[in-house]
Amino acid sequence: MTLLPEYTHIINNKLKHTYLSFDNEGNLIIKSPKVSQAFIEQLLLKKSNWINSSREKILNKKGRKVTFKKETTLFYLGQAYTLHCIQYTKKKYKLIFENKIFTLYYPTYNEESFQKSIDHFYKKESEILISPLVKEWSNEMQIYPNKVSFRKAKRQWGSCSGNNHLSFNTMMIKLPLDVIQYIIIHELAHIKHKHHQKSFWFCVEQYLPDYKQQIKVLKTYTTY
């Protein structure tokens, strides 16, 4: 007897076909018009190899959300570093990176506060590192954003609005420097090219000939 994977089924009668996807935690999502349970089970059996391999890829992505119940690591500029959690007498939660080790000092065990400390560290480091890189590449490309901001996002690494406001995901600081620069060049190119047609990719390639390799590396990371 073959065990079927767990899944969430979302019925939308506006859909004409059935779609399989995963959330960032590797949970299977099925979206379809109203169909029979037998149809779903047959589809899951038919797609079992794809489901298993796709889930494995997602769960093996680098930079996943930290689990504090066991020894863990944090990614910083493409490298994984050990995270130590140490209780102390002060009231403030504090994350320090020294000698290639992350140390999170805490007054009370609280995973939500732990995550906030990590998010704060990533935001601060992103602004310190990425802001001058945006200026550097803006000058190189002669393309200038109207505004640059940083925020934590679940899906996008970066975005360019219609009024040329660039927004970068603070989780970018997890990535290797070459990949960070690819994202910056990508979003700057969108100021001139509001699409992903040939002219856009030609612009990116002018300044980063190996951009396709950077995209491959980027796909091995998750935003959270």
Image (spheres, rainbow, N blue to C red):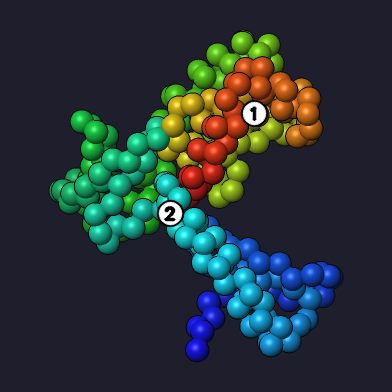
Residue 177: image location, x then y, percent: 45, 27
The three-letter code of the residue at mark 2 reads Asn
Which residue is depicted at the point 49% across and 45% down?
Answer: 220
Determine whether, in the image, residue 32 is placed left or right of residue 181.
right
Q: Is residue 10 above or below residue 103?
A: below
Residue 171 percent coordinates (x, y): 47, 40
The residue under label 1 is 186
Among the 4 quarters of the image, the one containing residue 145: top right
Give the numbered dot on residue 174: none
Which residue ends up furthest to the left in the rendered image?
89
The numbered dot on residue 60 is 2
Front-lying residue, 106 or 97:
97
- The answer to whether residue 128 is left or right of residue 39 is left
Residue at figure coordinates x 54%, y 44% from the top left:
219
Q: Position of residue 64 (x, y in %)?
A: 42, 51
Which is more toward the observer, 107 or 158? Answer: 158
- Measured from the top left, where is residue 134 in percent x and y? 56, 20
Q: Residue at x 49, y 55 (%)?
A: 57
User: Which type of secondary structure does the marked residue at label 1 adopt?
Assistant: helix
Task: Classify residue 190 as left or right of residue 215.
Answer: right
Query: Which quarter of the figure has residue 110?
Result: bottom left
Q: Amino acid at mark 1?
A: His
Q: Earlier in the sequence, mark 1 or mark 2?
A: 2
Cα gap from disc 1 to disc 2, whole angstroms: 25 Å
> Which element type, helix, strand or loop, lies under badge 2?
loop
For the point 73% across and 87% down, the residue is: 36
Asked if residue 161 can be seen in this view, the reply is: yes
